[in-house]
Image (tube, helix red, strand yellow):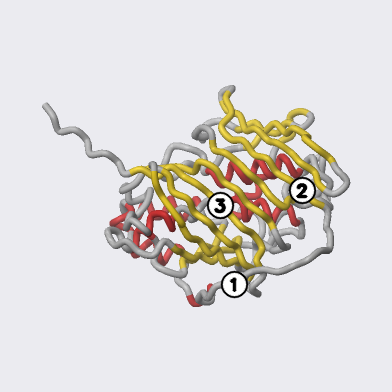
């Protein structure tokens, strides 16, 4: 019998109801870290699609899996704070070392360092809490079109295939994201290149397949997706199309998340995103993740390097 991701002695990740060998199975396999020593785990890397580095959301999700494997299952994470230190090499595995910082009566704290080639590439601190009752309020869910009324990612990206580098590039992007059904509520950055817009964007997402009833698994998958589109709002403010278009270069610098209420990553979630500022080659973005019923489930903040490529010299 498969144990949840929170098990101190991990077993394979739960198989989704969609059946074996689906893209979601492949993603779950990436999150199923191999224990190699006490509090030390090894994770496989995914495919590099547009840039020669490991997708940041994958590293963050794997690090959270590693932390969760050392925490009792009745204490889900309530926050994480992380820094991307070096680009991840997609050709070699990543080793995750967990430090058991604190085990208190209500809260548990873990620190995780991800290492490749003998150097740290990512650092994460995560805090876990057992369930408690308390005061409760939340801001209202913003208006958004129903996810079923929106075009699929394939329909959206293929409309802009020439701008994104052709059908082959679009197919690679779709293949890399095929475990997730992600739909833009408005035109993505590459849909309005050269036309600055209000720095706000919305996407709906859910996994392409059902998941087991393990809260940590759903949180880790939301962490994975949270890095896909958050900096889009920065690009919108300047009419930039993004990494696939090539009119900016950049990477995530840090990433913080707060998990407020239970949710399922295999049910529709609205990711409402905005950018309050960009300066100094960096852009800041904020996100809120709501359930379809309007519950505020997650808050996200990320800063990233965003630079305009310099023209190449045409000197003799």
Distance CA(mark 3)–CA(mark 1): 18 Å
Between 285 and 219, the one lying in front of the other is 285
Residue that appears at 50% across and 65% down: 203
Q: Earlier in the sequence, mark 3 or mark 1?
A: 1
Does residue 315 lie above or below 44 as drawn? above
In the picture, the disc for residue 128 is 2
Looking at the rendered structure, the secondary structure element under dot 2 is: strand
What percent of the width, then of the height, locates residue 93? Answer: 59, 32
Residue that appears at 51% across and 39% down: 54
Residue that appears at 66% across and 54% down: 258
Quarter holding residue 271 = bottom right
**Tags 1 and 2 touching, CB below 8 Å:** no
Q: Earlier in the sequence, mark 1 or mark 2?
A: 2
Quick check: 64 left or right of 274?
right
| Quadrant placement of the C terminus | top left
Q: Which residue is mark 1?
A: 141
Q: Which residue is mark 3?
A: 301
Q: Earlier in the sequence, mark 2 or mark 3?
A: 2
What percent of the width, then of the height, locates residue 285? Answer: 49, 54
Looking at the rendered structure, the secondary structure element under dot 1 is: loop
What percent of the width, then of the height, locates residue 279? Answer: 39, 46
Does residue 44 lie above or below 160 as drawn? above
């Amino acid at each position: 019998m498969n144990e949840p991701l929170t098990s101190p002695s991990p077993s394979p990740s739960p198989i989704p109801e969609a059946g074996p060998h689906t893209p979601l199975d492949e993603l779950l396999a990436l999150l199923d870290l191999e224990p190699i020593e006490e509090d030390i785990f090894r994770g496989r890397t995914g495919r590099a699609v547009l840039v020669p580095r490991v997708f940041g959301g994958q590293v963050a999700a794997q690090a959270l899996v590693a932390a969760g494997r050392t925490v009792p299952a009745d204490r889900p994470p309530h926050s994480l704070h992380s820094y991307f230190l070096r680009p991840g090499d997609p050709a070699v595995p990543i080793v995750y070392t967990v430090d058991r910082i604190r085990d208190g009566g209500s809260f548990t704290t873990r620190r995780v360092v991800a290492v490749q080639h003998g150097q740290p590439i990512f650092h994460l601190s995560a805090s876990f809490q057992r369930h408690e009752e308390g005061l409760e309020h939340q801001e209202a869910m913003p208006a958004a079109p129903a996810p079923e009324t929106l075009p699929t990612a394939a329909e959206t990206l293929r409309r802009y295939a020439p701008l994104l580098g052709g059908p082959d590039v679009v197919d690679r992007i779709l293949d890399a994201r095929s475990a997730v059904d992600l739909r833009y509520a408005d035109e993505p950055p590459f849909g309005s290149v050269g036309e600055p817009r209000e720095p706000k964007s919305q996407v709906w997402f859910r996994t392409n397949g059902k998941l087991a009833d393990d809260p940590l698994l759903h949180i880790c998958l939301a962490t994975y997706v949270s890095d896909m589109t958050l900096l889009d709002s920065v690009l919108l403010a300047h009419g930039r199309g993004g990494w696939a278009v090539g009119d900016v270069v950049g990477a995530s610098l840090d990433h913080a998340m707060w998990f407020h209420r239970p949710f399922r990553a295999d049910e529709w979630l609205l990711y409402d995103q905005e950018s309050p500022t960009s300066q100094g080659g960096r852009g800041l973005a904020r996100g809120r993740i709501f359930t379809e019923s309007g519950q505020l489930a997650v808050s996200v903040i990320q800063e990233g390097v965003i630079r305009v490529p310099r023209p190449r010299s045409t000197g003799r």
